C-alpha cells in the first residue's frame, strides 16, 4: 500500500521549495518516520539532496515526458515501505510545457495529491492574500491544503500576513519561516552545486530540520497528507528505457552524475546488472560489460583530468573495438567525442569514438523538453520508436561529421532537425531520454 503523500509547491521558482522540502523531510525523520520523496519534472540535482535528507532514493515524476503507467509505478515505488512521501514541485505550481502540461498541478490532479504551497513574503504584506487566494482557486482539480509563509521579516510582519490570509480564505497557514539568508545552497550553471560536492550539506539539512520543526504545525501537516490512488496501477514497476545490455557499465562520479534512478532501476527490472565505474578516478569500464552508459554531468569542469586518464579512455576504446554498445547523454556525449573545448578555450582530446567536437567556450543555454525518433536500430530500439526527454546544457557542437542518431522536436511540436551522432556501436546526443512513447494526454 502506498503511503500518505503531499506535494510542496510554490507560486514561482525561488520561493524556498527545496529548502522547505529538505527541512520537512529531516523534521519528519526525526520523529521516527521513514520518509520517501519525489521531485516533479526533469531534475538531477534536487533528488540527490532529497536522498541525503531521507536516506531513500528519490524519483522524478514528469507528466509531459512519462507515460501514465511509468508515473504510477514510480509513485508506488516512492510510497513503498515508508510512512509518508514528500514531493517537491517544479517552478510555479501551474508551470510546465508551453501547453501547460508537465506541471506540478498535473501530478497533483492525476493522483489526487494534496498541495502545500510555500510563498515567499520578502517584499509583500496584505497582498499575499490575493496571491494565495488566486492559487487556491485556480484549478478545481488541484487542492491546496496548507500554506507556509517563507522569508518573513519578523513577528509584526507575520501578524500582518496571517491576518490578511485569515480574512480571505479558510486554507490553513501551517506556519512561517523567518529570513535566514545564510541557509542557502550555492549554484552553478546547471543549477545547485551537487549534493556530493556540498561540504556542509548534512549540517545545513539538520538546521533546516530544526527550523521546520520549530515553526510549522507538523501534526496538522501530517493529517493533511493522503494516500494517492495508484495501488496496482504501476504493473511490474517502471521500465522507461530499454536495457542497453545484460551487464551495463555506468559512469558514476561528480563528472557524470546525471543518471535517473528510475532508468537504472528499470534496467535492473529487465534483468540487467549495473556495474559502476569512475572516469575521474581513471577507472576503465568493466571489460565484461556488453554495454556502457555515460550519463550527463560536468565533464567541462574536469576536462583536463579526463583527458589525462588513460585507463578510462583506453577502456572505452577497447570496448568500442569489441563492438560493445556505448551510449552517452549530454556530458557523456561530449566525452565520447574527439575534443572538448573548455571555458578558457583550451582543447582536450577525449575518447575520440565519435567525430564530434564540443565547446563550452562562449556558453549559450539550450533548454527544453524534447520528443525524439530513433534514426537507426540500437539496443534502445528500432525506428520509428520514439522517446520523450529533455535538453539542458550550455555547451554546443562545433563539429559533427557522423551519422545523426535522432530526429527531435520540442514540446510545441516544432521540428528541431537531426540530433546527436552514431558511429558503429557508439552513439549519443545532448538529449536526456526519460521514457518511451506513447504518452497519456492530461485532460482538464
Image (tube, rainbow, N blue to C red):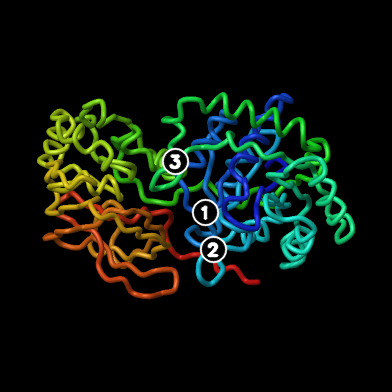
Q: Can you give x and y, in whole percent of width and height, for residue 130 in the image?
A: 77, 64
Label 3: how many residues lie within 10 Å, few (<14), some (14-19) or many (20+)? Answer: some
Label 1: how many residues lie within 10 Å, few (<14), some (14-19) or many (20+)? Answer: many
Label annotation for residue 96 = 2
User: Secondary structure beneath disc 1?
Assistant: loop
Q: Give the residue pinned by disc 3.
A: 269
The quarter of the image holding the C terminus is bottom right
User: Secondary structure beneath disc 3?
Assistant: helix
Q: Give the residue pinned by disc 1.
A: 41
Residue 21, by quadrant, is top right
> Distance between the Cα atoms at labels 1 and 3?
23 Å
437 up-or-down from 6: above or below: below
Taking 228 as reference, is 166 left or right? right
Residue pictured at 58% horizontal, 34% vertical: 182
Badge 1 vs badge 2, beta-carbon distance below 8 Å:
yes
Taking 308 as reference, is 247 left or right? right
Viewer-proximal residue among 90 and 422: 90
Viewer-proximal residue among 313 and 69: 313
287 up-or-down from 379: above or below: above
Q: Can you see residue 120?
A: yes
Nearest to N terminus: mark 3 or mark 2: 2
Q: Which of pointers 1 and 3 indicates the residue nearer the eye?
A: 1
Label 2: how many residues lie within 10 Å, few (<14), some (14-19) or many (20+)? Answer: many
Viewer-proximal residue among 421 and 50: 50
Amino acid at each position: 500500500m502506498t503511503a500518505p503523500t503531499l506535494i510542496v509547491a510554490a507560486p514561482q521558482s525561488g520561493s524556498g521549495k527545496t529548502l522547505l522540502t529538505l527541512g520537512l523531510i529531516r523534521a519528519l525523520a526525526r520523529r521516527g518516520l521513514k520518509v520517501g520523496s519525489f521531485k516533479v519534472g526533469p531534475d538531477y540535482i534536487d533528488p540527490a539532496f532529497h536522498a541525503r535528507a531521507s536516506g531513500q532514493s528519490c524519483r522524478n515524476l514528469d507528466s509531459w515526458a512519462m507515460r501514465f503507467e511509468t508515473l504510477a509505478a514510480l509513485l508506488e515505488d516512492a510510497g513503498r515501505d515508508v510512512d509518508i512521501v514528500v514531493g517537491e514541485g517544479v517552478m510555479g505550481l501551474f508551470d510546465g510545457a508551453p501547453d501547460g502540461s508537465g506541471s506540478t498541478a498535473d501530478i497533483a490532479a492525476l493522483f489526487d495529491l494534496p498541495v502545500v504551497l510555500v510563498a515567499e513574503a520578502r517584499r509583500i504584506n496584505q497582498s499575499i492574500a490575493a496571491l494565495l487566494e488566486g492559487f487556491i482557486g485556480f484549478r478545481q482539480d488541484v487542492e491546496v491544503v496548507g500554506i507556509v509563509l517563507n522569508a518573513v521579516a519578523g513577528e509584526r510582519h507575520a501578524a500582518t500576513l496571517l491576518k490578511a490570509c485569515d480574512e480571505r480564505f479558510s486554507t490553513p497557514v501551517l506556519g512561517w519561516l523567518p529570513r535566514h539568508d545564510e541557509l542557502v545552497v550555492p549554484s552553478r550553471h546547471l543549477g545547485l552545486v551537487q549534493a556530493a560536492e556540498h561540504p556542509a550539506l548534512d549540517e545545513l539539512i539538520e538546521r533546516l530540520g530544526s527550523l521546520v520543526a520549530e515553526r510549522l504545525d507538523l501534526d496538522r501537516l501530517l493529517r493533511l497528507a493522503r494516500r494517492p490512488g495508484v495501488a496496482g496501477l504501476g504493473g511490474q514497476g517502471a521500465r522507461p528505457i530499454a536495457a542497453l545490455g545484460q551487464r551495463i557499465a555506468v559512469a558514476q562520479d561528480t563528472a557524470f552524475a546525471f543518471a535517473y534512478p528510475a532508468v537504472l532501476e528499470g534496467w535492473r527490472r529487465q534483468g540487467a546488472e549495473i556495474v559502476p565505474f569512475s572516469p575521474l578516478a581513471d577507472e576503465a569500464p568493466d571489460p565484461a560489460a556488453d554495454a556502457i552508459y555515460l550519463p550527463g554531468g560536468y565533464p567541462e569542469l574536469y576536462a583536463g583530468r579526463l583527458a589525462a586518464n588513460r585507463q578510462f579512455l583506453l577502456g572505452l576504446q577497447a570496448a568500442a573495438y569489441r563492438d560493445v554498445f556505448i551510449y552517452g547523454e549530454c556530458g557523456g556525449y561530449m566525452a565520447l567525442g574527439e575534443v572538448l573545448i573548455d571555458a578558457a578555450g583550451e582543447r582536450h582530446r577525449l575518447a575520440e569514438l565519435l567525430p564530434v567536437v564540443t565547446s563550452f567556450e562562449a556558453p549559450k543555454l539550450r533548454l527544453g523538453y524534447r520528443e525524439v525518433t530513433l534514426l537507426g536500430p540500437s539496443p534502445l530500439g528500432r525506428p520509428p520508436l520514439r522517446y520523450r526527454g529533455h535538453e539542458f546544457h550550455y555547451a554546443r557542437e562545433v563539429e559533427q561529421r557522423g551519422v545523426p542518431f535522432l530526429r527531435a522536436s520540442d514540446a510545441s511540436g516544432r521540428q528541431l532537425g537531426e540530433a546527436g551522432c552514431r558511429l558503429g556501436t557508439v552513439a549519443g546526443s545532448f538529449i536526456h531520454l526519460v521514457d518511451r512513447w506513447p504518452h497519456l494526454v492530461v485532460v482538464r
